Image: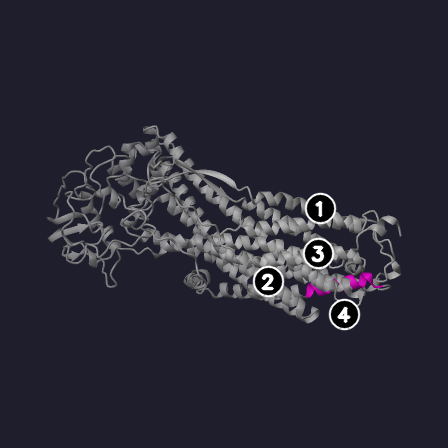
């Protein structure tokens, strides 16, 4: 033995250092769950004078960098342990039996658990609103790890020179030597230790130097923003006696004969509850949405079941059952694949047994084909397509019909762009049933099968470890998903607001051009999209953090399980490869569904959030409904009695729109309603059309003695012709728009109507005649042409 090796420290020193580092870091890790987040600073005053602060410095930890560096340190531990596993599987060399590497397997696992544990607990604490990235315990943890790893990096070259492999024959290795390139294994261990030292060297000062961000200070209460649930004139604004210019503000006159508040009993029992289109007393009246509980998720899924399951179609139900059988067959195939793979490996490695490889190889290839996306999965998708289309069709039709049946009161408050975005995002509801059938049930089955196989073939120790990793994985994933759900909800709200501004500006394009509002609208949209992107980047960052945390847990399970398999001395060395292949294949098949389980929970939550506002929309009641015993309106003389007993009406229950109105229109008679703007003329027409219903005691409207509340809305509106003040046309042909007043009208009837409106000659002068498309809201026609077509 050379003098250099004789003067080298004893290999026992490395073992003691590894043991000390493992114990120290794990003990410090145990204190991490007890940490609390930093206390937010309180504003202070000196009692003499108050200085208005314009901006304030906010110190935030470099969370993403800290988590990234902790993950890199965990990765070095994982790779360190993987070297031990690789030697045992490939060369049948149990490295941990050699003095310099004694305890390496436990040291690798301890460091992986410690670094990954701090990253996971930090993410957990941040999700609870108590980040610990600047805690003294974490700083002490990193300092201790750095000190131990520096000592290891110094001693490893002294104990085991990296230019030698193992200088002396080892009794634990066949033939007294190891068939590995000289210096490879010590160099890998040493290199990973040095790399971890570099990572910790960067991490340690990062904990002491957080990022400083300067934020503006708000000194006044935020101005309520008119959202989709706000009144046209908020109560606070209506109550204000002065405008911002100091002038007396006129009281609201919208839909009223006078500006005085209503003294009559309100025509509504109550103002509609805040919802997607309903009014509220303030912009903030909409309650903040809390996190969905499991019972709430179950309740919503139960409510959606009639629209997701084809309960009225036996053929579609049969297809769904066949798809379920295909899913069950896939579970059996997945369970058989690892065993067939191990048979292939055994046939290839067994001396003189190559002639037996074809049978297990063909079985393995066939099973892999069936388990792939082009096998049973393709057949399942093909059969499932009609069921999925049923779900899409039923939900889309339900939402569309409900929108058309909502009252005018709701439509006067809604924002078209926001409603369209809600309908777009609400389409995600159609994927929930597919997730439940093709992900949840198969995942539960795969996990149960894999755990049983681990217990039966590898013993209780491995099954307990994998089950524990699985439980922690699911728990952490659910918690982080709940945190991400809150962030995503804010992002969805910002996205809906952005869509509302976008659509509002396009619908009022001419007005924007009239007043040169391009820059103003561009700035509004820019602010909205910037706010949306701020939430979007937070959602993306939270996703990266969750994926990183999940990967750390899976890596810990893989390393611990691999060490348990390859270091199991109860089986001969010749079986290590076969057993390890079975283990790693089943572990991959377990981690796949396990990862899918977190994805499923995340997807269901996201889909339910995306559809939450659609469900709110579907919950919106239609204020004007036909009575169960409503009859068809029978028109004889056409006498209209408006308020024989005086009509009183209020839109919101606070301000009177009509107060004691009474008149009669005799057969063949005419009546003109004259009054100032907002005096209630349009309100009378809306009541006649039953866009609103009079409350009991507020009078009645009768046609030929029939109370219009007792007849069907369809027969009432069919009996009345109207030329609306605002002539709006569908983005369709002229013939379509003229014929809209009588569905199924013949071409001759359409042309006769155009002649009566004195627009026929003008229409036939167009290149496409009656097939001319008028554009959105009839913008391709002149004002007079649009009015005549509307008539």
Residue 344 horizontal/vertical position (percent): 77, 62
Q: Is residue 457 depicted above or below 607 in this figure?
A: below
Callout 4: helix, strand or loop?
loop
- The quarter of the displayed image where residue 632 is located: bottom left
Of the numbered discs 2 and 4, the one sitting upstream in the chain is 2
Tell me how far mark 3 sits from mark 2, CA to CA: 28 Å
The quarter holding residue 467 reads bottom right
In the picture of the structure, the residue carrying the numbered disc 3 is 18
Q: Residue under label 4, please give it.
A: 570
Q: In the rendered image, is residue 105 in sight? A: yes
Viewer-proximal residue among 289 and 103: 103
Question: Dot 1 surroundings within 10 Å: few (below 14), some, or many (20 or more)?
Answer: some
Question: Which region of the structure is painted magenta?
Answer: 336-350
Task: Pinpoint residue 417: horizontal percent, then vertical percent.
Answer: 38, 43
Q: Main secondary structure of the magenta part?
A: helix
Tell me if mark 3 has few (under 14), some (14-19) or many (20+) residues whose alpha carbon lies within 10 angstroms of its own: many
Q: Which residue is mark 2?
A: 470
Q: How far separated are the C-alphas under marks 1 and 4? A: 36 Å
Left or right, 341 with respect to 349, comes to: left
Choose the circle earlier in sequence order: 1 or 4.
Answer: 1
Above/below status of 764 relative to 37:
above
**Nearer the camera: disc 2 or disc 4:** 4
- Of tags 3 and 2, which is closer to the observer? 3
Question: Residue 194 bears which disc, if any?
Answer: 1
Nearer to me, 467 or 127: 127
**Earlier residue among tags 3 and 2:** 3
């Amino acid at each position: 033995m050379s003098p250099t090796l004789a003067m080298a420290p004893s290999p026992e020193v490395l073992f003691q250092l590894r043991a000390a580092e493992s114990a120290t870091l794990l003990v410090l890790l145990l204190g991490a769950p007890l940490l609390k987040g930093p206390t937010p600073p309180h504003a202070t005053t000196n009692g003499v004078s108050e200085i208005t602060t314009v901006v304030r410095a906010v110190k935030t930890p470099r969370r993403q960098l800290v988590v990234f560096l902790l993950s890199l340190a965990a990765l070095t531990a994982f790779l360190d342990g993987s070297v031990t596993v690789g030697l045992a599987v490939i060369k049948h060399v149990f490295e941990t039996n050699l003095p310099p590497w004694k305890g390496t397997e436990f040291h690798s696992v301890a460091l992986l658990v410690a670094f990954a544990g701090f990253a996971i607990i930090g993410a957990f604490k941040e999700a609870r609103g108590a980040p610990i990235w600047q805690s003294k315990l974490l700083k002490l943890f990193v300092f201790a790890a750095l000190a131990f790893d520096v000592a290891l990096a110094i001693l490893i070259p002294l104990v085991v020179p990296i230019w030698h492999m193992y200088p002396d024959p080892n009794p634990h290795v066949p033939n007294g030597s190891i068939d590995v390139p000289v210096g490879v294994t010590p160099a890998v261990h040493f290199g990973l230790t040095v790399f971890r030292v570099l990572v910790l060297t960067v991490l340690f000062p990062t904990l002491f130097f957080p990022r400083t961000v300067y934020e503006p200070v708000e000194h006044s209460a935020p101005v309520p923003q008119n959202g989709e649930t706000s009144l046209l004139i908020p109560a606070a604004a209506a109550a204000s006696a002065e405008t911002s210019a100091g002038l007396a503000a006129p009281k609201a006159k919208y839909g009223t004969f006078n500006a005085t508040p209503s003294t009559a009993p309100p025509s509504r029992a109550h103002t509609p509850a805040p919802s997607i289109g309903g009014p509220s007393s303030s912009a903030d009246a909409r309650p903040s949405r809390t996190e969905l509980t499991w019972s709430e998720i179950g309740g919503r899924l139960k409510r959606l079941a009639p629209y997701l399951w084809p309960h009225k179609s036996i053929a579609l139900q049969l297809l769904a059952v066949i798809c379920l059988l295909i899913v069950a067959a896939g579970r059996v195939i997945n369970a058989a694949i690892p065993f067939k793979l191990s048979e292939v490996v055994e046939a290839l490695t067994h001396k003189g047994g190559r002639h037996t490889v074809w049978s297990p190889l063909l079985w393995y290839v066939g099973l892999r084909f069936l388990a792939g996306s082009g096998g049973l999965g393709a057949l399942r998708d093909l059969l499932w397509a009609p069921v999925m289309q049923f779900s899409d069709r039923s939900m889309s039709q339900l939402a569309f019909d409900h929108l058309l049946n909502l009252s005018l009161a709701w439509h006067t408050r809604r924002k078209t762009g926001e409603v369209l975005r809600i309908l777009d995002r609400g389409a995600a509801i159609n994927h929930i049933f597919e997730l439940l059938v093709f992900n949840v049930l198969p995942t539960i089955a795969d996990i149960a099968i894999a755990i049983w196989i681990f217990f039966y073939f590898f013993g209780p120790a491995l099954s307990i470890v994998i089950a524990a990793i699985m439980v922690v994985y699911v728990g952490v994933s659910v918690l982080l998903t709940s945190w991400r759900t809150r962030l995503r909800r804010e992002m969805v709200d910002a996205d809906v607001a952005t869509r509302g501004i976008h659509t509002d500006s396009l619908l009022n394009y001419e007005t924007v051009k009239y007043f040169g509002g391009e820059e103003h609208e561009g700035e509004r949209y820019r602010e909205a999209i910037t706010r949306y992107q701020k939430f979007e980047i937070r959602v993306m960052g939270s996703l990266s953090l969750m994926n990183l945390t999940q990967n750390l847990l899976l890596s810990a399970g893989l390393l611990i399980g691999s060490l348990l398999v390859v270091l199991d001395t109860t089986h001969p060395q010749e079986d290590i490869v076969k057993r390890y292949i079975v283990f790693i294949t089943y572990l991959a098949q377990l981690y796949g569904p396990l990862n899918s389980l977190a994805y499923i929970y995340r997807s269901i939550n996201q889909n339910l959030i995306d559809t939450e506002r659609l469900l709110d929309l579907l919950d919106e009641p239609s204020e004007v409904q036909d009575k169960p015993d409503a009859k068809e309106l029978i028109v004889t003389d056409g006498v209209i009695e408006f308020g024989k007993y005086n009509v009183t009406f209020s839109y919101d229950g606070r301000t009177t729109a009509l107060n004691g109105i009474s008149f009669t229109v005799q057969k063949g008679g005419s009546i003109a309603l004259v009054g100032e703007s907002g005096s209630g003329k349009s309100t009378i027409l809306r009541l006649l059309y039953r866009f609103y219903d009079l409350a009991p005691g507020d009078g009645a409207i009768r046609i030929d003695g029939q109370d219009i509340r007792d007849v069907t809305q369809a027969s009432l509106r069919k009996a009345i012709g109207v030329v609306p003040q605002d002539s709006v046309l569908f983005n369709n042909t002229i013939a379509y728009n003229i014929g809209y007043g009588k569905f199924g009208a013949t071409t001759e009837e359409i042309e006769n109507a155009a002649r009566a409106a004195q627009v026929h000659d003008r229409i036939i002068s167009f290149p496409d005649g009656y097939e001319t498309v008028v554009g959105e809201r009839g913008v391709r026609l002149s004002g007079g042409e649009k009015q005549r077509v509307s008539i």
